[in-house]
Each structure stands twice: as structure tokens, then as C-alpha cells.
Image (cartoon, rainbow, N blue to C red):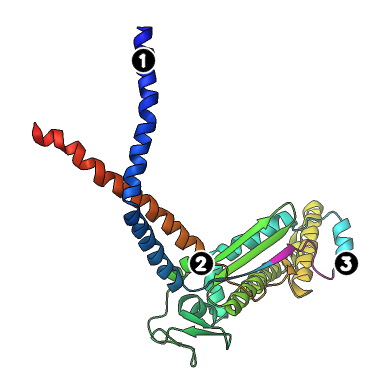
Amino acid sequence: MTDIENTNSNSDLQDAPLELKELFSILWKGKILIIVIAAVFFVVAAIYALSLPNLYRSSASMSVINMGAGANTITTQISFSGLSVQEKGVKGPRYVNTVRSRAFFKHLIEVDEDFLPALMAAKRYHKESEKLIYNSDVYDAVNKKWLVEKPHYLDAYDFYRGKVTIVYHQERSIIDISIEHISPVAARDMVESIMYKADQMLRDFDLEASSEALAYLTTAIPKQQQLALRSAMNDMIMNQLETQMMTKIGPTYIIQVVDPPFVPLYRFAPNRTFISLSAGVVGLIFGIIFILMRHFLPTLRKPASGS
């Protein structure tokens, strides 16, 4: 048994190079067709890649404000008094979740009338004039009027989420935001609009909430007889006064711009070389498989037809 097994093993080793040579010979004979198929894939992909518009990415970085820009002695006294303060760890995720929310997007396109057309009706970018060209069948840029039914904010929201990337780095208390657009100028403007409109929205919300809380507390304290509850209410009033102060000082409320948005010089996508070469490789593999199938399939069918 051992001699037979050794003989079969040696036979397999001798046949292996012959099989590789046969495969190589088959592929070599069909090399022209393989090259043609790979070239067709490459050319088609290149044409497709050239038809794709350039996409530019503008980005910005923001730090999360802890006590509000320009905090003065009052802020220091409030901080040392032991009263609770909105920490960075709360403000950062709150800001990011706001930017990602449907409610904010609806607010954004209401207060910034150029945002929705740039998102949904942009056709191409004129590099010489640095102007965004809109689809004239959809939007009248001169009169700022939709020529078709204005996109619903829920439909446009999906495009918004596909264009905007925002990340909060908790360890550094940094928020990074970026947008991809066919216009580098529009990309910069859209990032800037989101940054400040989200900050202003949170500022207005907290100011309104603190005003309502103060109105209630100042009315409720005189009616409260228990000293412990009166003291707790006084502490709440101090907290709300702190919120009022932080919403009314400084150019921003939640964020402080570290790296402002910019007009990118070079496109971010598409990578036309990668698309074309990848398609060429796929075409090469497809050509090899086609040549091998064309050679071996008739051979495999012969026994079946003869039986």
C-alpha cells in the first residue's frame, strides 16, 4: 500500500506542472480577447468616471465651550459656589445630535433660504466665476423661486445626512464637521451655516427655557414656607441666571471655532484613476474566466452528449 501511495503522489507532482502549462497555454492563446475585454471595461469605466462631477469637501473643527466665552468674575463665583454647570461632556453630544436631527434641518432651511436649493437643485459649478449653477427647470436662482414643488424637508433630510458628517471627540472636547458638494464655495458656506445656526438654535432654546423657569421660581418662592425648599429654589434661580448670562455673552454659546471652514482647492472625489483601474482589473479577471469557460465547457459536455 505504501509503494502504491508513493507512486500516486509522484504521479500527481509530475502532472501538476503539465496542468499549469496547459492553463497558461490556453490563456496565452486567448490573450488578445482578454486584453480587449479588460480594455473595454477600462474605457467604459473611464467614460463613466469622467461624467461624474467633482466633489469638494469643506470641514471645520470646534471646541466645546465650558463656561462661555468672556466669562467674568460672576462666572467664577458661580462656579466656586458648587452649583451645577453644563459640562462639555453634555454639550458636545447635545450639539452633534441637534445637527443630525430632522427638527434642526427643518429650522435650518427655514432661516437659510439658500441652503435647500444648494442641496437639492445644484447642477454644476462654474469655476471661473466661482458660482453655483442651478437646474433651470427646477429652481430660479435670480428670483429665488422653486419652479417645481418645493422638496419636502423629510425628503431633503436624507440628502442632508448623506452630505454632512459630524463627529464629537469626547477625549479632546472637539467637534469635527464636514460637507461634500460640487461647489467648494457652497461647501464652505453650508458648513458655516450649520455651525452657527445650530449654536443659535440651542442658545434660543436655553434662553427661553431659563426665562420660563425664572418666572415660575420668582413667583413660587414667596409662597413657599419651608426654608429648605426656599433655599433649593434660590439655588435653582442662580443656575437659571447663569444660563441667562451664558446665552447673552460671547459670539457663540456651545461652540468655539478652532479651525474655520474653508474653500477647498482640490476635489475630494471621485477618484477617477482608481475607478478606471479597478474596472480594468475586473475586466481582466472576467476575460480570464471567459477564456477558461469557453475552453473547458465543451469538453465537459461531450461525455453527456455521447451517453
Counting from the top left corner in percent of width and height, residue 64 is at 74, 62
Residue type pointed to by label 3: Ile
Q: Which mark is residue 270?
A: 2
Q: Is residue 221 above or below residue 7?
A: below
Residue 8 relative to residue 86: left or right: left
Counting from the top left corner in percent of width and height, residue 211 is at 70, 70
Looking at the image, the residue that sits furthest to the bottom is 143
Residue type pointed to by label 1: Thr
Considering the numbered disc 2 on the image, is that residue within a helix, a strand or a loop? Answer: loop
The residue positioned 66% from the left and 62% from the top of the image is 176
Considering the numbered disc 1 on the image, is that residue within a helix, a strand or a loop? Answer: helix
Q: Which residue lies under the disc numbered 3?
A: 74
Quadrant where the C terminus sits is: top left
Comparing labels 3 and 1, the label whose residue is closer to the camera: 1
**Mark 3 vs 2, N-terminal side:** 3
Q: For this rendering, which residue is in front, 132 or 151?
A: 132
Comparing labels 3 and 2, the label whose residue is closer to the camera: 2
The residue positioned 37% from the left and 9% from the top of the image is 3
Quadrant where the N terminus sits is: top left
Counting from the top left corner in percent of width and height, residue 145 is at 45, 88
- How many discs mark residues in the rendered view? 3
Disc 2: CA contacts within 10 A as few (<14), some (14-19) or many (>=20): some
Residue 133 relative to residue 128: left or right: left
Counting from the top left corner in percent of width and height, residue 53 is at 48, 74
Q: Are marks 3 and 1 in contact (CB under 8 Å)?
A: no
